[in-house]
Structure formats: structure tokens, C-alpha cells
Amino acid sequence: MTKTRMPTIVVAGAGLTGLSAAVSAREAGARVVLLEKGSRRDVGGNAAFSGGLFLFRYDGPDDLTSITHDFEPGMKADRIEAPPYTRQAFAAELMAMSSGRAEPRLVDTLAERSLDTVRWLASKGVRFTFNRTLGAEVRDGVLHIPPGQVLTCTGEGMSRGFEVIRPLLAHAERIGVEIRWSTPLAEVLHSDGTVSGVAVGDGGRTLPADAVVVATGGFQASRDLRREHLGPQWETVRLRGTRLATGDGIQAALRAGADRAGSWSRCHSAAVDPTMPAPESSAAAPPFPLHGFWLGVLVNRDGERFVDEGPGPWVRNYSKMGKAIMRQPGCEAFEIFDQRTAARVADEFAGSAVPIVADTVPELAERIGVPTGRLVRTLATFNDACPPGDDTSEDRGTADITPAKSHWASPLDRPPFVAYHAVAGLTFTFGGIRIDPDGRALDPDGVPVPGLYAAGEAVGGLFYGDYPGGAALMRAAVFGRAAGRTAATETRPAPHPA
Ligand SMILES: Cc1cc2nc3c(=O)[nH]c(=O)nc-3n(C[C@H](O)[C@H](O)[C@H](O)COP(=O)(O)OP(=O)(O)OC[C@H]3O[C@@H](n4cnc5c(N)ncnc54)[C@H](O)[C@@H]3O)c2cc1C
């Protein structure tokens, strides 16, 4: 006589992707073992350091208030005006930002399932709030929200993303997900052409499994893989997030037959303050992101501008500023402001980044160590190219200079001047495992590798050159949830003798 047992799904990685996969696999009726390379103090991976911003589609205020009625201070309103951010708009934005290279099926799936997945997270106890930082404002009792990045999870400061992890972890433990801390996935094992288990630790111990979901993040924390794929200048880059995403899960999946996808030579990298160390545990703050570049100018150590600081809203452009800085001499830069904007930046950067202040441009040049004549010339050329007028509005673009500053171009002529030292901070890599929209790992012929699934930062195919803020947490939850569910529902465990 035989008895059917429930399938055992091993999920590797306790970040947002892995927790989403573990919860959905468990809720679909599987036994779930969640392996985490770090200890409990490392739970959450990059999400623990994130700003908690989610990008998802919605058709209007009703969709938003179906998720939350929480408002950050100063945002309470009688009515919400929220033009839709549709599935089509989300998909079109991702496609445009990848210059048409993103995998269309993944793009459509991310856009389509995003709203439902935010609701799913809310149903597990994640609390969302309307956030203030991205252009939402209250006028005459009405909250006006520009389409796009609308909700963050509740919580304080830069690491508020930990508030996504805390309830999800509690929920996973409540429903019986078995978590093994300090147990890294080393190898995916096969028998008769399908996944049969995993080797963990140094590879000497094994665990049986009917399916494996790889949710181990990118390879940004591996010095060797950074050098090989991003280039030698990335070897010593500062990490913005987890030190444990070393690409070993990705490599195990490739050895198990999965294909690679996406742009392995590209990454998400923001400008950060160089005085803060990379975080050591989930409780640590990440290096502070210097997102104020759009209000001023960026110069390299030769005193030259090198990038359009205002191509559009910062949240759609900050992920490439680190890369632009990395291409500069010494891989460093300075964000410079005058008194038109310095106070706004100081508010945002308060206590987290170190201002360098000077009454004149030559004095500033001396303080930050760039050639005086060059910086004076650079700022004079920039100032001359700014449109007349005194404001800092979005519609102000420079004329006849390269690089242009396309928006928010106002002369820097009101001393004292303020500079912030900036270096590249690496957030995550873009290349990874090839998957289908339901999280099945695919081989080089596009055929699913039986029993192997992957999601989140461990997969490639969605992000290439640019990245819209909020799309990475959304990707983690959408595809983590899908991979866990698919693994649990399509895996048929071999019957065990009774
Ligand atoms: C500072 C910062 C701010 C961010 N802000 C935002 C934001 O506001 N909005 C947004 O959309 N995105 C943001 N992101 C990106 C987002 O946080 C990530 O894309 C997302 O959390 C990735 O989740 P993941 O679970 O796929 O990977 P990870 O978070 O990297 O998790 C992988 C997990 O796997 C574990 N692991 C690694 N190797 C193994 C192994 N061999 N075996 C077992 N476990 C292993 C790791 O320890 C880790 O816990 C931010 C990232 C950073 C660093």
C-alpha cells in the first residue's frame, strides 16, 4: 500500500523573494524548507536595507485605498486624485527603460500581477502608506498623486523595507515553514532527470526535495564575479545591501541545467556617501544614497560635469548615477549646490552625509581637491547655459552645453556653496537565471528544468540599462510568489512506501 505525501519544496534565500515563495508554496499545500545562508540577524536580504517602495499598476484611488488608508504626516486629505498607472503604462515604462531588451512575457506578468501581489502582501500583515517623497502633495484638502511610485511600506528611514520582511517572516513561521538558518545552498541534486534534493553548507550534507526554488539574490557581493562581469573597477565597490548575495545560488542553478539571462555586465548602482560602511547585518543602515543630484550639478575630480543630472524624476534615474561615477577618474564625484537648493538637500541628507561648505567657488574647489580654474569654468559655463529666471522648476533645461541638464537647471550663483562627496554604491546585479513567467527555470532551449524554479534578483531578463524605483521589490514578491506556487502545485512527489 502506498500513501501520497505532500511535496517538499526547498527554497534557498530568506529575502523577500524567498519568503514570498515559501509562503505561497506552503499555502498551496507543500512542506517547505527555507534555507538561509546567513543567521537570523541577516533575514531579509536586500529588502531589509531598502526604502520599501513598491511600483505597481492601479486604475485609480479605489485600488489604492483597497490596500491602505495610512498617510505619512502632512498627507491626510478628504479626497485622493490619482490618475491611473495602468498595466500598459507599467509594461511600457519597463520596456522603454530596458531599450526594448526586457523579456516581454516577464514584463507583462510583473505589470499584470503587481496590484494583486501588493494586496497579497497586505493580507500577510505588511502595512503600506502613501509616501511623500515622490511628488504627492495635498492642495485644498485633496491629495494629488502623480502616477507611479505611490506606496511604501510603513516604517522609518532608509531601511523601512525591513517592515516588509518582519510580518512575512512571522507569517511564514506561523504557517509552518521550516527555516534553517546558516545553511547555504551549495548544489542542486538530480535523479532520473529531475531535481531530487540539495547539498548544503560545504556540500557534504544533503536534504531531499521534490523541487527547489533559487531565491538567493544577485552576485553583487562576489568580488570575483564583479570583476569578471562588471569590470575591474567594480572589485572594490561599496555594497548598498546584503553581503551574502555572492551568486552561489545562481551558479548552482546554472550547473543544474538552467540557462543564463539578462545583462550580466550591468547593475543598479546609486551615488552614495563614501563615509558610511557597507551594512553588516539586517539591523544596520545602508550607505546613504545621495539622490539630490537633480537639484545641483555633479562634477568629477577634474572639475568637469559628466552626466545629465536632470534627465527626469530622480526615482527613474538614480540607478545609473553610480555607474556614471564609476567611469570617472578615481571613481568619485561631487554633488554641488548653492543656496537655492542647499537647504532642501540638507533636509534630506541631514545627519547622514557630510556637507563641505565654502563662500566662493575657488574655496570650494580647494576644499574638495579639484582644480580651481576648471571648476570655476565648469560652473560659469553651466550658469550661462541655464534659462533666465530665478526658480528651480522642472521645465528648465540648459541650452548648448554637453552634457545638458535637461530639467531643474538653475544657475549656482548664491553662496555659500555646498558639496557632497559621492562614490558608486552597488545595489544589485542585473544578470541571472532564465525563467518563465511562473518561475520555472529554463534551459538553453527554453524548456523547463524539471523541479527547478527561480525568482527575484537571482533571475535575469527584466532590467537592463535603467530601472524604475520600486520595480525590484515588486519583482521579488510577484515572481517569488509565482515560483513557490508553481513548484508546489505542479510537483508530484514519488509515493513513499507506507
Ligand atoms: C539600499 C537598498 C535600497 C533599495 N530600495 C528599494 C526600494 O525602495 N524599492 C525596490 O523596489 N527595490 C529596492 N531595492 C532592491 C530590493 O530590495 C531587492 O531587489 C529585493 O529585495 C531582492 O530580493 P531577493 O530576495 O531576490 O534577493 P536578496 O534580497 O538578495 O535575498 C537573497 C537572500 O538569499 C540569501 N542567500 C544568498 N546565497 C544563499 C545560498 N547559497 N543559500 C541560501 N541563502 C542564500 C541571502 O543571505 C539573502 O537573505 C533596494 C536595495 C537596496 C540594497
Image: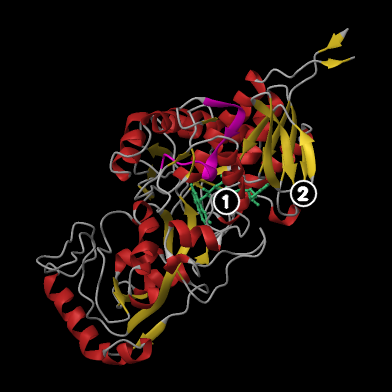
Determine whether the residue tagged by mark 1 lies in a helix, strand or loop.
Answer: loop
Residue 37's mark? none
Outermost residue, front direction?
A: 192
Q: Is residue 350 magenta?
A: no
Task: Measure the alpha-carbon separation of dots 1 and 2.
Answer: 18 Å
The front one of 178 and 85 is 178
Instruction: Name the front one of labels 1 and 2.
Output: 1
In the image, 428: left or right of 79?
A: right
Determine whether the residue tagged by mark 2 lies in a helix, strand or loop.
Answer: loop
**Image coordinates for residue 82, horizontal then vertical, percent:** 36, 37
Segment tinted magenta in the rendering: 448-462
Image-quadrant location for residue 111: top left
Classify mark 1: residues with Cα within 10 Å, few (<14), some (14-19) or many (20+). many
**Image coordinates for residue 485, horizontal then vertical, percent:** 62, 25
Residue at 44%, 67% (x, y): give it: 232
Outermost residue, top direction?
A: 1
Specify the quadrant that holds the N terminus.
top right
In the image, 254: left or right of 375?
A: right
Image-quadrant location for residue 77: top left
In the image, 392: left or right of 7?
A: left
Residue at 71%, 26% (x, y): give it: 210
**Image coordinates for residue 26, horizontal then vertical, percent:** 71, 28
Q: Is mark 2 within 8 Å of ligand 1?
A: no
Residue 247's mark? 1
The front one of 210 and 116 is 210
Residue at 64%, 40% (x, y): give it: 18
**Image coordinates for residue 61, horizontal then vertical, percent:** 42, 33
Classify mark 2: residues with Cα within 10 Å, few (<14), some (14-19) or many (20+). some
Q: Amino acid at mark 1?
A: Gly
Name the residue beneath numbered marker 2. Answer: 181
| 294 is higher (above) or lower (below) than 268 | below
